[in-house]
Amino acid sequence: MTDNIKDPDYIDTELLATAEVAPELLHMIPYNTGLEPVKLAEYGRNVQNLVKFCMTIPDREERTRCAFAIADIMTILFPALKKDPNDRKKIWDHINIMSNFQLDIDFPVPVIQEEEANPKPDTIPYSDSREIIFRYYGKHIQDMVQTVADMEDSEERRNLIGVIANHMKKLMVAHNKEAVSDEKVLRDLCFISNGKIDLMPGDIFLHDYHEASATHKQTKKKNKQ
């Protein structure tokens, strides 16, 4: 033990593990949570601090020279950026971003501005629920009915009407199975199409749809197991 203490390179790891920082020194230890967020993590906080320092230089020419020096440092970190002029522009864009778009220097290229870096997304158009005639059919069925209604009479149109009407009946079963009838589906079809598709039950064949009983569902699950 004595020999180890005399050794200048000896470190007592047990003592180091139990060492405590004096309370008066705690305020000197910076924590990332208390620092300004790093805007571009690939460059790290040091480069961001250099840009921040560059902004404090009062002389514009000296500030510009400092910015060029920072750009050179960034190309050292990413050598591939030296080869392509477009990538060189990225460096100046990134410097401007790290300065919160406030660095006043003679940029060698046009740089990205705040409105370009943080564009406002386009407003998403939402369908007005008041435009939906029957909620249980939905807007898509309504649009399909109105499209088919404007088609010229043909076999394709009749086939499409049959597919849509059967799907409407299926949706009605899911919505209210007690009120399902061919007459109701065809009346709704006529109403949605503004009278352009006016059919009677004998004019079109609609399948009978029934909800699967709970017993049937449980039997299928048992068979799978």
Image: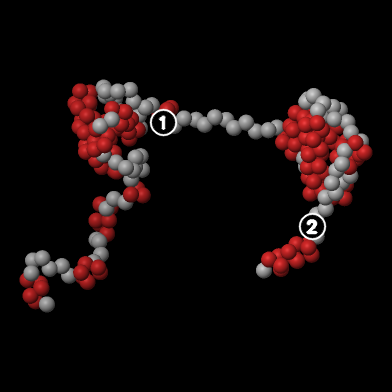
Question: Can residue 130 be seen in this snapshot?
Answer: no
Residue drawn at 25 percent across, 68 percent down: 17
The quadrant of the picture occupied by the N terminus is bottom left
84 or 110: nearer the eye?
A: 84
User: How many angstroms separate mark 1 from mark 2 (CA)?
Assistant: 54 Å
Residue drawn at 85 percent across, 30 percent down: 197
Q: Is residue 179 left or right of residue 148?
A: right
Residue drawn at 8 percent across, 66 percent down: 8
Amino acid type indicated by mark 1: Ala
| Number of residues whose C-alpha sits closer than 10 Å to that of mark 1, classed few (under 14), some (14–19) or many (20 or more) | few
**Residue 111 x %, y %:** 34, 25
58 or 113: nearer the eye?
A: 113
Amino acid type indicated by mark 2: Ala
80 or 69: nearer the eye?
A: 80
Residue at image mark 2: 212
217 or 100: nearer the eye?
A: 217
Residue at image mark 1: 117
